[in-house]
Image (tube, helix red, strand yellow):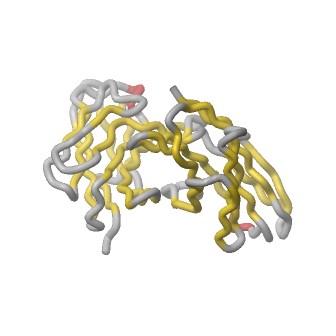
């Protein structure tokens, strides 16, 4: 099993550009999450999903959209990137009370 | 709303015991978990407390007291590889909300 994978690993965007981050899991988990991590801020929940076709807002959803068309995939979109969205993005899926994290995507917006 | 407080940094000596505290203010809370993250890596699950009391997993133990809105992670027989950041996280509804993390420094 690959676990949780994220694509891409690194990306540099210019302000105003758009992009989609892909998260995939092969563990048949219902719940999936997107977090961002900034120095000194810990992990902040952006959006999450409790099953295929469902999404919900987390702590910091502004500027992001998500979709969960297939159970194994959870996509995070940035429609118009801003320098404040420079961060490391982690996806996670969960089984009961344990979360499994992907390796992260390091995004820089210039 | 919810908030979690944990120390930003803790320093301990190799072979010793260290305790990382976490206090929380949240409604509808039903569990507390702990994660470890090494520099450049992804968080990994350490433990979960759904009930009050102590949970032990090898060198790591975690404690929860709902009446005190308090929990801690206890690391015994510290090894240099335990140098990492440790996050407490509250489980509320379908969400898991993380604290800002505690950086653990281990001295030889």
Task: Please state, as top left, top right, bottom left or bottom right, where the C terminus of chain A lies in the image.
Answer: top left
Image coords of residue B94 (percent x, y): 38, 43
Residue drawn at 29 percent across, 52 percent down: A8
Res. B108 in view = no
* Closer to the camera in the image, A64 or A98: A98
**Which residue is depicted at the point 48% across and 56% down?**
B42
Residue B31: percent from left, percent from top? 54, 48
Front residue of this view, candidates B37 and B39 = B37
Among the 4 quarters of the image, the one containing residue A57:
top left
Residue B53 falls left or right of residue B16? left
Q: Please give left or right for residue A69 compared with residue A57 in the image.
A: left
Name which residue lies at 28% across and 55% down.
A30
Relative side of A93 to A80, left or right:
right
x, y percentage for residue B104? 72, 53
Q: Which residue is painted at 29% across and 35% down in the image?
A: A56
Quarter of the image with the N terminus of chain A in it: bottom left
Q: How many marks?
A: 0
* Res A41 seen here: yes
**Residue furthest out toward the left:** A69
For residue A67, above or below residue B78: above
Q: Position of residue A40 (x, y in %)?
A: 60, 36
**Who is closer to the viewer here, A13 or A24?**
A24
Residue A86, placed above or below residue B94? above
Q: Quadrant of residue A99?
A: bottom left
């Amino acid at each position: 099993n690959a676990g949780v994978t994220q694509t891409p690993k690194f990306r540099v965007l210019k302000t105003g550009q758009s992009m989609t981050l892909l998260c995939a899991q092969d563990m048949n988990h219902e719940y999936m999450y997107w977090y961002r991590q900034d120095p000194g801020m810990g992990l902040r929940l952006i959006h999450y999903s409790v099953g295929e076709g469902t999404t919900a807002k987390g702590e910091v959803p502004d500027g992001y959209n998500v979709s969960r068309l297939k159970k194994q995939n959870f996509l995070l979109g940035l429609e118009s990137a801003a320098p404040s969205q420079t961060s490391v993005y982690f996806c996670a899926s969960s089984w009961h009370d344990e979360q499994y994290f992907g390796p992260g995507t390091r995004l820089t917006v210039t | 709303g919810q908030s979690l407080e944990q120390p930003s940094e803790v320093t301990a000596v190799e072979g010793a015991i260290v305790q990382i505290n976490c206090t929380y203010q949240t409604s509808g809370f039903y569990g507390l978990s702990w994660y470890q993250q090494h520099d450049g890596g992804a968080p990994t699950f350490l433990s979960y407390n759904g009930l009050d009391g102590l949970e032990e997993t090898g060198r790591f133990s975690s404690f929860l007291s709902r009446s005190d809105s308090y929990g801690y992670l206890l690391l015994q027989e510290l090894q240099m590889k335990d140098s990492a950041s440790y996050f407490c996280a509250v489980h509320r509804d379908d969400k898991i909300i993380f604290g800002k993390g505690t950086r653990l420094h281990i001295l030889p």
